[in-house]
Image (cartoon, grey):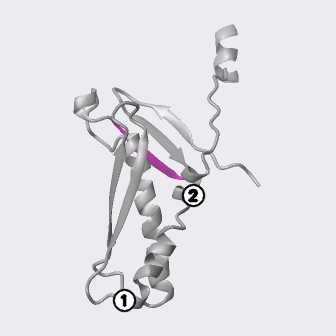
Amino acid sequence: MSTPQCTITLGSGKRVDAQIGSFTIHTDQPVASGGEGSAPAPYSLFMASIGTCAGFYVQSFCSSRGLSTDGIRIEQRWLSDETTHTLKSVELDIIVPPTFPEQYRAALVRVADQCTVKKAISAQPTFTVQTVVSAQVAAIATA
């Protein structure tokens, strides 16, 4: 089994893209940070991945029980440390319409809590960052 990976390319200005399989995810910085605001900032995508992951679990739960997802949404808030700018807490509110069956409301919380992005953050993975000299670039430089 291969290790999942993505390739990050640097664009003009503050744009940076990620190629994941056949998908390209574009990022940029807000104008206030020197970017053009042409795409979400990487941190915004990170935060959105939490809510969309929880949403996937909620959607799957409803689908498996034949429950309508009309009117269901997730509102997400987060708090960062003002000094270190690190993430301190994330809150997810699963908003359901009054017609959503009460017997399933607590179950929505339990399934959203199974989000794999949340689990990955909670596991506190290690990070390795290193410089690797490209064989192509090295070959061109010595030619």
Residue at figure coordinates x 42%, y 62% from the top left: 52
Residue at figure coordinates x 63%, y 22% from the top left: 131
- Mark 2 Cα within 10 Å, few/some/many (few <14, many 20+)? few
Where residue 103 sits, quadrant-wise, is bottom left
In front of the other: 93 or 45: 93
Q: Which mark is residue 6?
A: none
Residue type at numbered disc 1: Glu
The image shows residue 136 at horizontal and vertical percentages of: 67, 22
> Taking the image as drawn, is residue 143 in sight?
no
Q: Which residue is mark 1?
A: 102
SS for dot 2: helix
Residue type at numbered disc 2: Lys
Q: Is residue 49 left or right of residue 119?
A: left
Q: Earlier in the sequence, mark 1 or mark 2?
A: 1
Q: Which residue is mark 2?
A: 119
The image shows residue 55 at horizontal and vertical percentages of: 42, 68
Whether 27 is among the magenta residues is yes
Q: Is residue 129 left or right of residue 101?
A: right
Labels in figure, total = 2
Whether 122 is among the magenta residues is no
Residue at figure coordinates x 36%, y 81% from the top left: 69
Quadrant of the snapshot with the N terminus:
bottom right
In front of the other: 24 or 121: 121
The image shows residue 105 at horizontal and vertical percentages of: 40, 82
**Compared to 77, does 13 lie above or below?**
above
